[in-house]
Amino acid sequence: MNGSSVANTSPSVKSKEDQGISGHDEKENPFAEYMWMENEEDFNRQVEEELQEQDFLDRCFQEMLDEEDQDWFIPSRDLPQAVGQLQQQLNGLSVSDNHDSEDILSKSNLNPDAKEFIPGVKY
């Protein structure tokens, strides 16, 4: 409802039949769109409570994530620096096939005819 329609209406005398039992006009209240202001403090309180609740949930969620991060094992964070250097050296190691297999066999002290070792079995 705009302001011009409110300004053009003139007050008229109503009979008791036109009025409701409560004594209010049965037609639409010209201030109906402003009635929310009557409960503005309640509305503000409700919105503030919702914002506080959302903030509380956000803080709880962040705290849960922080605790979860502490429970996970992350080598770069949890291991000392010296262990990290050893880990890098181990990652750099590789097995190469540059050696001649016959050269290795000629230097071996192992018996090629020996039975396979099985733990717990006596021969």
Image (tube, rainbow, N blue to C red):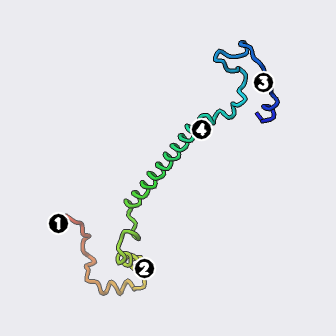
Q: Report how many numbered discs are placed on residues in the image.
A: 4
At numbered mark 1, what does the secondary structure look like: helix, strand or loop? loop
Callout 2: 10 Å neighbours few (<14), some, many (20+)? few
Callout 3 amino acid: Pro
Label 3 and label 1: CA atoms lie apart by 116 Å
Q: Nearer the viewer, mark 1 or mark 4?
A: 4
Q: Position of residue 10 (x, y in %)?
A: 80, 26
Decide which of tag 2 and tag 4 comes sooner along the chain: 4
Residue 105 position (above or below residue 7): below
**Residue ID at (29%, 84%):** 108
The mark nearer the N terminus, 1 or 4, is 4
Q: Nearer the viewer, residue 89 or 81?
A: 81
- Nearest the viewer among 12 and 3 is 12
Query: Which element is circle 4 on?
Result: helix
Q: Nearer the viewer, mark 3 or mark 1?
A: 3
Q: Which mark is residue 92?
A: 2
Q: Amino acid at mark 4?
A: Glu
Q: Which residue is mark 1?
A: 122
Q: Which residue is mark 3?
A: 11
Q: Kindly indicate whether the residue at mark 2 contacts the one at mark 3 (C-beta within 8 angstroms).
A: no
Reply above or below: 6 against 52. Answer: above
Quarter of the image with the N terminus is top right
Please give the name of the residue rendered at 42% of the width and 58% of the height, measured from the top-left corner: 66
Label ID, residue 40: 4
SS for tag 3? loop
Q: Residues within 10 Å of mark 3 (few under 14, many from 20)?
A: few
Q: Position of residue 114 (x, y in %)?
A: 24, 74
Q: Are marks 1 and 4 in contact (CB under 8 Å)?
A: no
